[in-house]
Image (cartoon, rainbow, N blue to C red):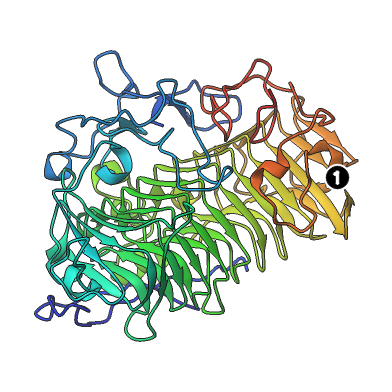
Amino acid sequence: MRRPFFVAQSSFLGSVASRASRHVAKRPDSHGSVLCMFPRKTTEGLATALLSSLLILGGCGDDGSTLDGSVDSGPPPDGAPTDTGTGDGGPADGAVDSGRDGGGPPPTAGRIPRGGDFMGDSERFNRHYTDPGYTPSNTIYVSPTGSGAGTMADPASPDDAFGRVGAGEEIRFLAGDYDGCWELDGEQSGTYDTPIVIRADRADDGSRGVHIQCCTTGRQACFNLEGADYVAIDGFVLEGGNYGVRTVGLGYAGSEHQVGVAIIDNEGFDQNRDPFFSGQSDWIAVDANVAHGAGSGDGHGIYLSNGSDWMIVRGNDLYDNASSDFQINADPLSTCEDVGIAFDAPACDGSARDGLGQGVSEFVLVENNYFHNGANSGPNFTSVRNSVIRNNIIGFYQRHGTSFWQETDNPNLGSSDNIIQHNLFIGEQSGRHVLQFSRYSDRNDVRNNVLLGISMSGTSAMADPGVVLLELDTATTTANVFEGNYYSGGSFDGHSPTASEVVNAAFESNWFEDFPFDRMGSPASLRPSSAAPFLDAASPTADTPHDREGTPRATPTDLGPYERE
């Protein structure tokens, strides 16, 4: 079982030889737009008020303030966001886009705009991600055989560029095949206004044009960011090593967390561990990436660990990974217990807005992803609070599906107070859950989702009553809200469907436009057809005003991630 740990190691660039560099590993899976947050009225069965979210561009209140009365976490680093920049962050109606359904480079539509609010706090994301008009002050061009000054006509080597890049500059990899690993640390950080951008050229056909074979020494990460703030990595194909991108802070306390990393439109595959890994990393955006083939070193497609907060996971395509495709693990056993902090101490279970809560991850937006065809289990949300999970497609696993849980018995560390709406969950393992809430994972709003319990053979699929559609720990999860969900096939453990929920013992693959019997396909293959029985089936919510393709939700609305026009 892997645990987070620290070891001293010199920087790849040799620039941190005088100080300890700390490495964050992780605990393995033991289960084998602007988002403005508003208070909602207490719903029957809720012990406390849930947060609600609206996709609004350009702020929340009429005076630019948040409307939830939240306490701000202090002045943004590097003056963020004292100016709003020039980018509008997308269409004026706040439409979202999956970033994957159409292929090609990721769109900017629906991204958080620079200077906007994110879940009640002023955004602190990477400017390369939030501001389409941002231009670096200088670009250093590199090529596989470069040894020159760093111009397009006379490119430098990657080693040379990483040795001298600074805030506001971009390293541009010209198209080609590379071998190696490169690193930045806290002495080579960007800022909120002037990020460091590491960017790959596109090929002539518009596909990703830079392939890197990751090294087999040191961290074995194509790109390793240790304590480096405001770095964006955009558009690469990363093969092998332990990690495609590894990005970590310098300690468990919030003041030591890394800030402002963006991992955009990369493909990572055949890593021994994780194509995309973060620890102690706040205000991180992981958008429009593809991750597959993560290996026997407890490989997940995307792994976000060690109490990181304020994160976006959006439009990613994860499949064929050895462990759960996607995992958030705040890991209080390491971030609290191992450093002498009690689980029930505010430093462990308090709010990130107060600089506390290093045993929990908060304020995470997980939307428009396609998590599928996994060699192990579905996503794990471990000690995740006050977050939004919407418009995702999750299914086709060899073990169980999605789990909301924790590793302690402190009720405050459960995966609680989350909004889980308009997702499609698919399970095909008899006796295993499609969706689970356990160990004080409570007060979640679970609404307008579609859950399927099926078995598949060749090009046929049928309802399977042995699949557990929803499993609840009835001793500790008594205040979750379930409304407007559609259940097909399967059975229940600890849950009695509510009056607004529908249970159908049957399943038909023609409910979808092109059901992916190979468990792959594109997300669009799971758009509902006119035969789907969950069209126009519920009231829309302020929390999910658009579907995963940016289509506004109608009244009544379709269930699941797509709105059929």
Residue found 16% across the figure and 49% down from its top: 191
The answer to whether residue 563 is visible is yes
Where is 421 relative to 244, above or below?
A: above
Q: Nearer the viewer, residue 504 or 217?
A: 217
For the point 22% across and 82% down, the residue is 8
Q: Position of residue 479 (x, y in %)?
A: 59, 36
Viewer-nearest residue: 120 or 514 = 514
Give the residue number, with chain letter if any, for mark 1.
489
Q: Please state which amino acid type lies under the numbered disc 1.
A: Gly
Q: Residue 522: percent from the left, percent from the top?
A: 66, 49
Q: Is residue 448 left or right of residue 505?
A: left
Report the front residue among 150 and 307: 150
Q: Is residue 261 above or below residue 150?
A: above
| Residue at the front extreme, as displayed | 153
**Residue 437 percent coordinates (x, y):** 62, 49
Residue 338 picture location, percent across and down: 34, 72
Determine crowd level at label 1: few under 14, some 14-19, many 20+ residues with C-alpha closer than 10 A: many
- Quadrant hosting residue 113: top left
